[in-house]
Image (cartoon, rainbow, N blue to C red):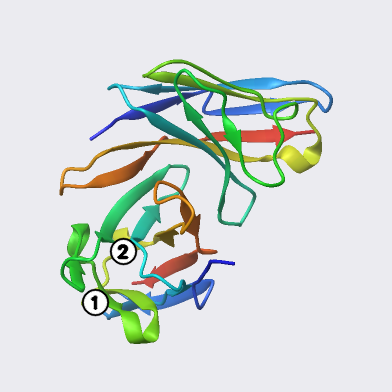
Amino acid sequence: AQSVTQLGSHVSVSEGALVLLRCNYSSSVPPYLFWYVQYPNQGLQLLLKYTSAATLVKGINGFEAEFKKSETSFHLTKPSAHMSDAAEYFCAVTRMDSSYKLIFGSGTRLLVRP
Amino acid sequence: SAVISQKPSRDICQRGTSLTIQCQVDSQVTMMFWYRQQPGQSLTLIATANQGSEATYESGFVIDKFPISRPNLTFSTLTVSNMSPEDSSIYLCSVEDWGLAGGHEQFFGPGTRLTVL
């Protein structure tokens, strides 16, 4: 069965430090991939998406992610963390049986220390 | 891009009762989705609601427990029936729409936080 794995349920970084959130997927066919952010008591907001164009995808708020087919990974990075980046981050992939449906990872809570 | 609102934003209910959650979109969309997010967990798709057809449910979810209506292209409701404490979750609706950066994306509502006592 398809799956999305996010390593680390919690990641803590200092303000100004590099943010790296990991996402690996299992799929025999490269899917479309997404990163969403969820701020407390809010819905999900799309950060960026990979749809088979450029493998390095730039998103909002300075985030970017690189699709690596050989590693089946789509890790999210940001060079310098801001306090406002503290939130829950979800990686998602399109399902093989329906490209309109998404499978979400378990989420990573990013904590930013002053 | 679509803007989605949900009502209520939160509710506390007694076990055995039912709650209907509304999802309103500011534009016409074909596909709407309902998700459940249990405390501290990820999102699980409950069902897909297309206007003019019956909702299609994912494995583990049934119509008797989660009846869905989709009367037009901008509105849907999800009912959580005969609730138990295990139904305490955040329920989110989403829609497929054309994104600002091009291509189809899912846009999410703010969610309904349900607590069942």
* Distance Cα–Cα, label 1 vs label 2: 9 Å
Spot occupied by residue B49 in the image (x, y as percentages of width and height): 50, 29
Relative vertical location of residue B28 with respect to residue A112 in this rendering, above or below? above
Which chain does tag 2 point to? A
Q: Callout 2 environment at 10 Å: few (<14), some (14 to 19), or many (20+)?
A: some
Residue at image point 43% right, 69% down: A111
Residue B45, located in which quarter of the rendered image? top right
Residue under circle 2? Answer: A83
Q: Secondary structure at mark 2?
A: helix
Residue at image point 16% right, 43% down: B100
Spot occupied by residue A46 in the image (x, y as percentages of width and height): 31, 51
Relative vertical location of residue A78 with respect to residue B22 in this rendering, above or below? below
Closest to the observer, B14 or B19: B19
Spot occupied by residue A85 in the image (x, y as percentages of width and height): 32, 62
Residue under circle 1? Answer: A16
Q: Amino acid at mark 1?
A: Gly
Residue at image point 45% right, 48% down: A101
Closest to the observer, A25 or A17: A25
Residue furthest toward the right?
Answer: B16
Sequence order check, earlier mark of 1 and 2: 1
Q: Can residue A39 be seen here?
A: yes
